[in-house]
Amino acid sequence: MRQGQDRDDKVLKLLRASPDLFISGQSISNRLGISRTAVWKHVMALRNMGYSIAGSAGKGYRLTPGRDTPFNAVEIRSRLSTEFMGRKVYLYKSLGSTNIKAKELAGKGVPEGTAVIADSQTGGKGRLGRGWFSPAGVNLYTSVVLRPRLDPPKCQGITLMAAVACAEAASKWLPKKPTVKWPNDILIGPKKAAGILMEMDAEADRVNHIILGIGFNLNMTHDMLPKDLRGTAASIMEKTGRTVDRAEFACALYSRLEKWYKVFVNEGIAPVLSAWKGYFDMEGRPIRVNSFEGVVSGICAGVDTEGALLIRTASGRVHRVISGDVEIVRH
Ligand code: BTN
């Protein structure tokens, strides 16, 4: 990190606060407690990142809102209003997997809430050993480091809380709220727009860290998809016709994650489940579940108080599934 890079975002924040006005170098210098030369250096650094900043000798600096906001760590920090989620953010052009990088950072002791973002992933990981299609320039691929002081089995609820955070964040961009497919896929209509992969490093009675990975399809178009995903993957832009600003979306997501993570840690799973059920529309529908116990088909009977899926089979027996893959059976 360049020396003073952590202040680029503060200069950007001040410029963005008055988009149509020039703000003098002296005023920025007074507000940030830095010299006018330092202000100029930050402005130059921001211009090098792609920001269009007009400068006038007598008036100061003015940010000209561009069509494409740069997608970088400075942009994210300048928009973020969280206490710890995403406060420390590492953004890479390309990674194998943000989960792997976040795990490496967690091992080095980074603080809770540290986030990793990649513009693209070459080995994006999905649940159950699958991959996650991660082309450049369009979507959000992020992983955050969590360190809950909870018993490891309780932490399963973190995927549900993340699903609530994703659904809530996406609702701001969608005409109609998305739905969740148990346990944690976010759907727009019948197609999947986001997935969550939680990986835990724990001992018998304590969690060392959790890596919460989220992939959200924001601006990906149908023609970018490999053939096998064409019938099943969706993006927000495809639904609305409008481009989603990725930095703005990341900040909205981190803010919802912080809110729901605090709820989960302080109050337990009940309030999280109740919010999650507001996005869940599978109850009463015919489903097929593939779990380590085998395949069970029946009618979805909702979820229990721990978030396990309930399926009523033709014999009337209710099966409880804690982990698996669900398919909604369409006739
Ligand atoms: C799923 O199968 O539904 C989970 C997909 C999770 C994908 C995200 S993208 C960011 C993070 N890094 C990864 O390698 N995987 C997760």
Image (cartoon, rainbow, N blue to C red):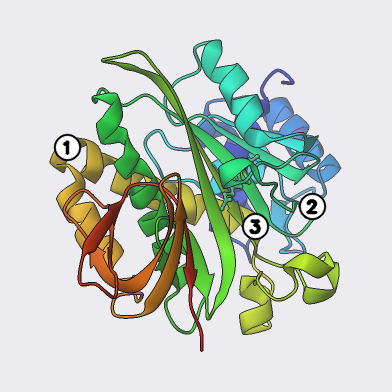
Q: Relative to 109, is 19 above or below?
A: below
> Residue at the location (66% across, 41% down)?
125
Which kind of residue does numbered mark 1 sit on? Asn
> Residue at the location (55% across, 10% down)?
108
What x and y, as percent, mark residue 146? 41, 29
Label 1: few (<14), some (14–19) or many (≥20) C-alpha neighbours in 10 Å: few
Q: Nearer the viewer, mark 3 or mark 2?
A: 3
Q: Which sits earlier in the primary sequence, circle 2 or circle 1?
A: 2
> Residue at the location (15% across, 52% down)?
270
> Looking at the image, do the residues carrying marks 1 and 3 touch, with CB atoms under 8 Å apart?
no
Residue 182, by quadrant, is bottom left
Residue 64, by quadrant, is bottom right
Picture disc at residue 56: 2
Q: Position of 261 compared to 48: left or right?
A: left
Q: In the rendered image, which residue does mark 1 sit on?
A: 266
Determine the CA span between mark 2 and mark 1: 51 Å
Outermost residue toward the front?
315
Q: Nearer the viewer, mark 2 or mark 1?
A: 1
Label 3: few (<14), some (14–19) or many (≥20) C-alpha neighbours in 10 Å: many
What x and y, as percent, mark residue 39? 69, 33
Picture disc at residue 246: 3
Q: Relative to 296, is 256 above or below?
A: above
Which one is nearer the viewer's eye here, 156 or 262? Answer: 156
